[in-house]
């Protein structure tokens, strides 16, 4: 996820520092389009001599993509929310359209805090 495409900040300051300064990764829960939870790691990669940065889902990503029939050029959205009890970051993956253009529509730019109860 190129950082320039992220519409709303979703990381807390300490999480941003952990990814950016220390090169760490965050263990998070991803809810896939089949509404199944997967443990996955979020990290940040820099390229272009550090001018561009992307958030990257690692470890289980290939499994999640295959299980959900995701292909290159498919249009997806990634939504974030935090568990109200422990403030743990979760991501939800939504498939918006196929690589052939079927089902893609305008993307939403609503920034809200959704709290898991």
Image: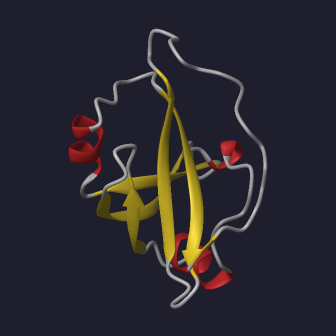
Total numbered circles: 0
**Residue that appears at 66% across and 67% down:** 114
**Residue that appears at 52% across and 11% down:** 101
Q: Position of residue 10 (x, y in %)?
A: 65, 66
Q: Quadrant of residue 15?
A: bottom right
Q: In which quarter of the image is residue 1?
A: top right
Image quarter (top left, top right, bottom left or bottom right) of the C terminus:
bottom right
**In the image, 112: left or right of 114?**
right
Query: In the image shown, does 113 or 1 lie closer to the viewer?
Result: 113
Above or below: residue 92 compared with residue 90: above
**In the image, 83: left or right of 64?**
right
Query: In the image shown, does 71 or 95 lie closer to the viewer?
Result: 95
Q: Quadrant of residue 4?
A: top right
Above or below: residue 22 compared with residue 49: below
Q: Position of residue 23 (x, y in %)?
A: 45, 72
* Colouring method of the image: secondary structure
User: Residue furthest toward the front?
Assistant: 117
Q: Where is residue 92 in the image (x, y as percent from the top left)?
A: 49, 54
**Residue that appears at 65% across and 78% down:** 12
Above or below: residue 3 compared with residue 108: below
Q: Where is residue 22 in the image (x, y as percent from the top left)?
A: 49, 79
**Residue that appears at 70% across and 32% down:** 107
User: Residue furthest toward the bottom?
Assistant: 85
User: Residue furthest toward the top?
Assistant: 100
């Amino acid at each position: 996820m190129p950082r320039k495409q992220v519409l709303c900040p979703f990381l807390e300051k300490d999480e941003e520092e952990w990814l950016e300064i220390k090169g760490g990764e965050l263990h998070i829960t991803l809810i896939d389009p089949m509404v199944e939870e997967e443990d996955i790691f979020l990290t940040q990669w820099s390229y272009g001599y550090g001018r561009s940065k992307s958030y990257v889902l690692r470890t289980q990503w290939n499994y999640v993509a295959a299980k959900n029939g995701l292909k290159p050029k498919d249009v997806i959205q990634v939504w974030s929310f935090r568990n109200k009890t422990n403030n743990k970051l979760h991501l939800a993956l939504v498939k918006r359209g196929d690589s052939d253009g079927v089902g893609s529509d305008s993307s939403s730019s609503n920034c809200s805090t959704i709290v898991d109860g």
